[in-house]
Image (spheres, rainbow, N blue to C red):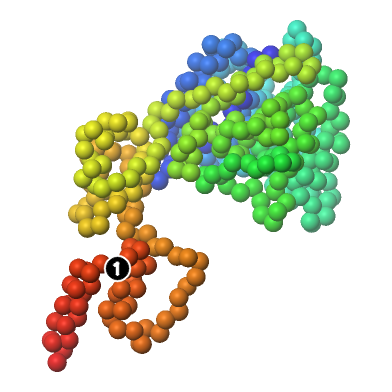
């Protein structure tokens, strides 16, 4: 059977005041085209369908249309809740939707539920493990307070008794990590828990022929080719600027044979950072070097003050998300200097201020401040 694995759609998300719905619609249209081109038989949506528990109406309509198009192509859809989703709202109508081969799981149970299907290679089971809070897992299995997600998953697998003589796929939305190496994370992900008990070792999922993960926004394999994060649908922070967003295509054949590859997604508007002087950045040759409609974070290197830089920059970059001035960035060496202000002259304090803010002093500015101080002192006498 041929599948697409995707996760972290975050439909309805707003980034720095900008709604991402138009961009999300554009990306989902590409997924529909891929499904048709590759003759996909199943879509795995591994959590965080929406960005918040009560999604905006427009986001619900977009997801409704996406499901309608998939059902029209006779593609089965497997959905689990992520940590951003309201499991109760996501489960609405789920028993009716099963009749259209749309399977939704949002609640933690003592065994991992699965959907069984069959093709020319035999039985295939798709296990759906939604996100759950650690307290839920501890209570379900009467575990001690110090127990972590790993302990809960071990209990789940013991109760589930996965039949390894048939092909098995698992979907989950947890922080799964490899035995060696690290997971690439970013700013737009929400921590699942605190206290060092949030991670689940990837080896626990070796019992499955493929594990479709959600939660981490960077597409990556975890420990083996058969355990993967598909990554998010779009870039949702500038820490994801260099991510190559994609969905995972995989075809599972006979037991032990699984062909996997990434299918890239083209953004409607990219997310990128640019840097330079304001007058240079608005030059036509610079603006036209990339899509001016992209979401941009701009670092201005100008030393002098600029009147309303945001308004000026948005005349050529309408989707400016961030503007910062390099000269205003403070530089610290992890040490705080304690000084007695009353023992320092005003000029000495100003020189220290310049050094901290700009990394160097400025004779012209110091001379100007000296003249101001002299004028003030003369007026007070």
Q: Is residue 261 left or right of residue 338?
A: right
Instruction: Decide: is 252 above or below 134.
Output: above
- Near-viewer residue (241 or 194): 241
Quadrant of image for the C terminus: bottom left
Residue 375 at x, y percent in the picture: 14, 82
- Near-viewer residue (222 or 350): 350
Residue at x 33%, y 71% (from the top left corner): 353
Which residue ends up furthest to the bottom in the rendered image?
Answer: 381
The residue beneath circle 1 is 361
Q: What count of labels does the image hold?
A: 1
Residue 12 at x, y percent in the picture: 47, 37
Residue at x 45%, y 75% (from the top left corner): 337
Q: Is residue 374 left or right of residue 274?
A: left
- Near-viewer residue (9 or 345): 345
Which residue ends up furthest to the top in the rendered image?
Answer: 120
Q: Is residue 320 left or right of residue 366?
A: right
Residue 158 at x, y percent in the picture: 86, 36
Instruction: Decide: is 358 above or below 142.
Output: below
Residue at x 32%, y 39% (from the top left corner): 319
User: In the rendered image, which quarter is residue 350 located in?
Assistant: bottom left
Residue 147 visible within the image: yes
């Amino acid at each position: 059977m041929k599948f697409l694995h995707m996760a972290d759609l975050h439909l309805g998300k707003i980034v720095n005041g900008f709604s991402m719905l138009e961009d999300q619609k554009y990306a989902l249209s590409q997924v529909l085209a891929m499904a048709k081109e590759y003759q996909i038989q199943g879509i795995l949506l591994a959590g965080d369908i929406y960005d918040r528990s009560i999604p905006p109406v427009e986001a619900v309509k977009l997801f409704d249309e996406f499901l309608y198009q998939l059902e029209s192509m006779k593609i089965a859809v497997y959905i689990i809740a992520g940590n951003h989703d309201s499991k109760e709202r996501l489960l609405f109508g789920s028993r009716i939707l099963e009749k259209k081969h749309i399977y939704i799981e949002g609640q933690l149970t003592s065994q991992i539920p699965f959907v069984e299907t069959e093709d020319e290679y035999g039985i295939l089971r798709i296990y759906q493990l939604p996100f759950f809070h650690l307290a839920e897992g501890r209570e379900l299995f009467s575990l001690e307070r110090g127990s972590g997600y790993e302990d809960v998953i071990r209990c789940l697998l013991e109760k589930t008794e996965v039949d390894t003589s048939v092909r098995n796929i698992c979907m989950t939305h947890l922080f799964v990590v490899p035995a060696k190496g690290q997971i690439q994370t970013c700013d737009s992900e929400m921590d699942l828990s605190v206290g060092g008990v949030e991670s689940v070792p990837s080896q626990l999922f070796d019992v499955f022929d493929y594990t479709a993960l959600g939660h981490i926004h960077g597409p990556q394999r975890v420990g083996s080719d058969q355990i993967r994060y598909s990554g998010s649908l779009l870039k949702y922070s500038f820490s994801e600027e260099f991510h190559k967003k994609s969905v995972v295509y995989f075809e599972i054949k006979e037991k032990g044979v699984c062909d996997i590859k990434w299918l890239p997604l083209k953004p409607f508007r990219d997310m990128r950072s640019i840097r330079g002087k304001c007058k240079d950045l608005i030059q036509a040759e610079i603006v036209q070097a990339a899509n001016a409609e992209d979401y941009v974070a701009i670092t201005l290197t100008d030393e002098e003050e600029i009147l309303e830089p945001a308004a000026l920059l948005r005349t050529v970059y309408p989707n400016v998300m961030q503007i910062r001035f390099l000269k205003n960035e403070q530089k610290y060496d992890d040490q705080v200097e304690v000084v007695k202000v009353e023992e320092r002259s005003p000029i000495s304090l100003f020189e220290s201020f310049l050094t901290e803010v700009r990394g160097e002093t400025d004779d012209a500015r110091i001379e100007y401040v000296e003249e101001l101080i002299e004028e003030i002192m003369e007026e007070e006498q």
